[in-house]
Image (cartoon, grey):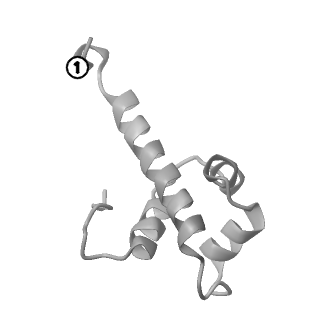
Amino acid sequence: MADVHNSTESLLTRTKKLLEQRDELTLREIAEGAGVGHEWLRSFVYGDRIKDPGVIRLEKLFNFLTDYQAAKRFNDRKPEARAT
């Protein structure tokens, strides 16, 4: 798994890495969870039509994906390893 918290990489690069690790999440689920438009997200993922994706949308997307990854890591742990 790539380190998405590398401070030398841009938010754009870190967000694209997270999108590559989306597993079973559909783009529609990500768009809804992040509060961004589905068509915007499709363009962002599959094309270079978005030259400037906008920091607010990018931040929403990054925050949703990092929260998803954190929840996934927590849920993948064995129950006895969880704090009580």
**Quarter occupied by residue 75:** top left
| Badge count | 1
Disc 1 designates what residue? 81
Which residue of the protein is positioned furthest toward the front in this rendering? 56
Q: Residue, x 44% and y 60% (percent of image)?
A: 18
Residue at position x 60%, y 48% in the image: 25
Q: Is residue 7 left or right of residue 52?
A: left
Q: Which amino acid type corresponds to the residue marked 1 in the rendered image?
A: Ala
Disc 1 crowd, CA 10 A, few/some/many (<14, 14-19, 20+): few
- Local SS, label 1: helix
Residue 66 position, x and y percent, is 42, 50
Residue 80 higher or lower than 56, as above or below: above
Residue at 42 percent across and 37 percent down: it is 72
Residue under the point 69% across and 76% down: 43
The image shows residue 65 at horizontal and vertical percentages of 49, 52
What quarter of the picture does the N terminus occupy?
bottom left
Q: Residue furthest right?
A: 39
